[in-house]
Amino acid sequence: MADLESNSRYEPAAVEPRIVERWLESGLFHPEADGDPRENYSIAIPPPNVTGVLHIGHALNSSVQDCLIRSARMRGRRAKWILGTDHAGIATQTQVERALEQEGLHREDLGREAFVQRVWEWRERYGGTIIDQLKRLGASCDYEQERFTLDERYAEAVQQVFVALYNKKLIYRDRYMVNWDPGSRSAISDLEVEEREVTDVLYYIDYPLASGSGAITVATVRPETMLADTAIAVHPDDERYQRLIGETAILPLVGRKLKIIADDYVKPEFGTGALKITPGHDPNDFEIGHRHKLGQITVIGEDGRITDSAPERFVGMSVIEAREAVVEELREQGLVSRTQEVVHAVPFSQRSGERIEPLVSLQWFMRMHELAQPAIEVVKDGRLRIRPDSERRRYLDWLENIRPWCISRQLWWGHQIPVWYRGSETYVGTAPPQGDGWERDPDVLDTWFSSALWPFATLGWPNATPEMRAFYPTDVLSTARDIIFLWVARMVMMGLEFTETVPFADVYVHSIIQAPDGRRMSKSLGTGIDPMALIEGGPRPPVFAQGGGSAGEFPAYGADAVRWGLLAMASGQDVRFSEDKVAQGQQLTNKLWNASRLILLGVDDGARAAVRPAAVEDRWILTRLQRAREEIGERIDRYEFSRAALGLYDFVYGELCDWYLELVKPRLRAGEPELAATLLHVLTETLTIAHPMIPFVTEEIYSHVPGAEGLLAARTAPERVGEIDPEAEGALSRAIEAVQGLRAWRDSAEVKVGATVSARLAADGYEETAEQIARLARLAFSENGGEPVASVPVPGGAVEILRSDAVDLDAAERKRAAARAKLGAEIERSERKLANDGFVAKAPPEVVQAERDKVARLRRELESL
RNA sequence: GGACGAUUAGCUCAGCUGGGAGAGCGCCGCCUCGACAAGGCGGAGGUCGCUGGUUCGAGCCCAGCAUCGUCCACCA
């Protein structure tokens, strides 16, 4: 116990790594696969990218999940936090490709097999970082069963799902317009596309009519795509063009004949009201092309260059080069009638940041409509709860308007599609086909396809493993908002399709932590924050500098402080990062540490006796302890983490330390045995309540508690930790208010801090607390003493201050006058309210009565002055 | 273009079913009181974004507006 005696400061850096080791060695985080999912508790962690590092969102989400897992574990449930990482196709492949570039190599130089081998090696080297960071944070994941979305068994599950969906005709191959990402050289899904506002030049181009009589002018921001035009469209009701419908125009530079068609899609008010139709390179035109059975021409290839479907002089040009060349030729021919700048939304790849090139391409798709229906049902009938409610609505909106999902990616790192081709034959199966000449589809599946199986594939599905029986379905999924569609909705669909149950009963969507200036935290903006820098100390980015001072370094706040601070920020609203909250968490750990020192160094080391409250304050703290236990537990159950965190803070500061420990100090010094038992009980249960939020400091203190055995993390928390005693609550609440009133009076009456003031207690309800009040307010109560020089109102009466050297009469009088004025104003306010007939007639009787009682009480107080 | 959310003390945020606004930090004053100066005690500070409405009573309910943010969306 040496460090308890000598360290008046809690040192997380010295304690936390040691505690992590004890937890890991104990095997506590790896529950046996016994029992059933209802008695057990499980959470599947949102798998971080295998080569990722912990960011603030992970830290928040991990604090949330660990709080839930530890709470469940301490309620005696087998708690399993399923851990693993995601292979993160595009992100990881891009990392390795960049590294290869340093060597002057391209992935084609290595070939597929060698390249994939390189990625595995990369994963070996960098894959452990985020797991180590989770340990450092105190996350009680099942580290003994770490999963990876490319594990052999996981891959089998993925293939089986693909084949099953193919056989149900929910997966199909089609030539369709996709979002082509020239950066990753792959198709990507709608969800991986983001719209950005861009200023483009709108070109007005004259297309001569075949009849020779004039031209029809179209407007476009992408003149280069005109090389693939196959029609011109106008609105059917547009009077300007009625006579041209059905006519033919000649495509400049190419010479192709274009029919002028009528389609509702065209907005007459935009541009010229005539739209060039390019089914090969525009999603809308693609649809229009289908409606009118137009041809599709592809002039931009997957490499982003002009194909040989275009006139020879353009072939091989990049999109930008082609645009310039096309515009130049058009100008030479006098066909650009005008230009105009427009600001409009343009799709970009979230992955590579490059502008999306819509292309018609042969890809694998998943039909989502049928799968979405059950996923909608379970939310509507309450089998799946999503909170907050706004997220529930967003989820439903998305599913109700769902579109096919492009699931093939032209990458090498991922689950290769289990499809083989031979001539015109197609084979789909989990094992390669028999016979020669088969060639496997080179594409891999979208990473989110495999992530969609996460809660059950990690437990060994499709096999009926003990883990599946014990822990599936899981209890809650805690996640950030930005992957509800990408991930959560798809897990629900896949879970319902393949396991016939929702994969989790609750979805908790946590707050987004923003930068202090309200922007999103992101590396590129420099607004990110490294949680490890907060835990262990490290550079503080400029945007986090406080008070305009230099950026400098974060102090080593420790994991508990970071966890508590993040939980306190997790109120359901998005919040700006607040270093102060982390600092507040650190103060809480320090406070708890020192309160524990007072108790543990003050009581005898002897065996623990049964708890027998000997004084009113003992009955009070046991009541408050029980209420804190209930309230904090309920708040965690309701995912109200900020309220749970603040509730803990309030209990530790506002009840335990500021009042209870101050009240019992004389008894503690006297070595009262009953008190020792109560103190140890209160300390132990406080640690237990606090543990899910601040596990390290509580575990450390627990190791010093006499009679405490094993790990606090493994302790089962009793339901009842104290008897509710309303009488004691009332007595202490009066005493506390009285002491605060008396201290305020002393302060404004300029009584010296150390001076003891003579006073007479003229109030009821202080039979058990008068002595304590006298000590804490530094009064000496006496029965005689004559005329009071001041009267301080307290609940149930007043404390009359008697003449003594300690009291400055003038100051006392000033104080008394101020109090009278304040009371007078309050009485007047209340009386005005009571004089309002409407209030008396229509307000609930108890409200009116309360107001009357208030006036009566204020009057008594005024009189006593 | 739609949808949702936010606007409360200098800052970051609470405020659950309407009954005269709270916390932390910061600020001011006092205090080496036998756990803790990363502390204790006391205090100042708010037209609850704006305008209307409902109500005896509105930070809370309704309508409109403003500003900020997020998400969704195929207008060249």
Image (cartoon, grey):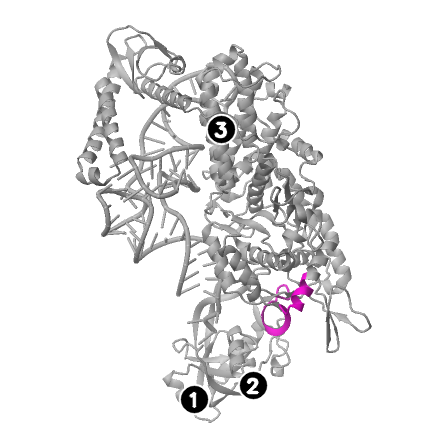
Percent position (x, y) of residue A426? 72, 73
Question: A170 or A801: nearer the eye?
Answer: A170
Where does the C terminus of chain A fall, quadrant-wise?
top left
Mark 2 lies on residue: A254
Percent position (x, y) of residue A659? 44, 21
Q: On what subunit does the disc labeled 3 rest?
A: A
* Range of magenta residues: A161-187
**C-alpha span from label 3 to label 1:** 83 Å
Q: On what subunit does the disc labeled 2 rest?
A: A
Amino acid, disc 1: Leu
What's the mark number on residue A244? 1
Percent position (x, y) of residue B63? 30, 57
What's the mark number on residue A626? 3
Amino acid, disc 2: Val
What's the mark number on residue A386? none
Q: Residues within 10 Å of mark 3 (few under 14, many from 20)?
A: many
Q: Is residue A748 left or right of residue A560?
A: left
**Total marks in image:** 3
- Foreground label between 3 and 2: 3
Where does the N terminus of chain A fall, quadrant-wise?
top right
Q: Residues within 10 Å of mark 1 (few under 14, many from 20)?
A: some
Question: Could you say whether the residue bearing mark 2 is in a helix, strand or loop?
Answer: loop
- Which badge, 3 or 2, comes first in the chain's sequence? 2
Taking the image as drawn, is residue A594 in sight? no
**C-alpha span from label 1 to label 2:** 21 Å
**C-alpha span from label 3 to label 2:** 83 Å
Marks 3 and 1 in Cβ contact (< 8 Å)? no
Amino acid, disc 3: Gln
- Foreground label between 1 and 2: 1
Q: Inspect the magenta stretch and tell me whether residue A164 lies in it.
A: yes
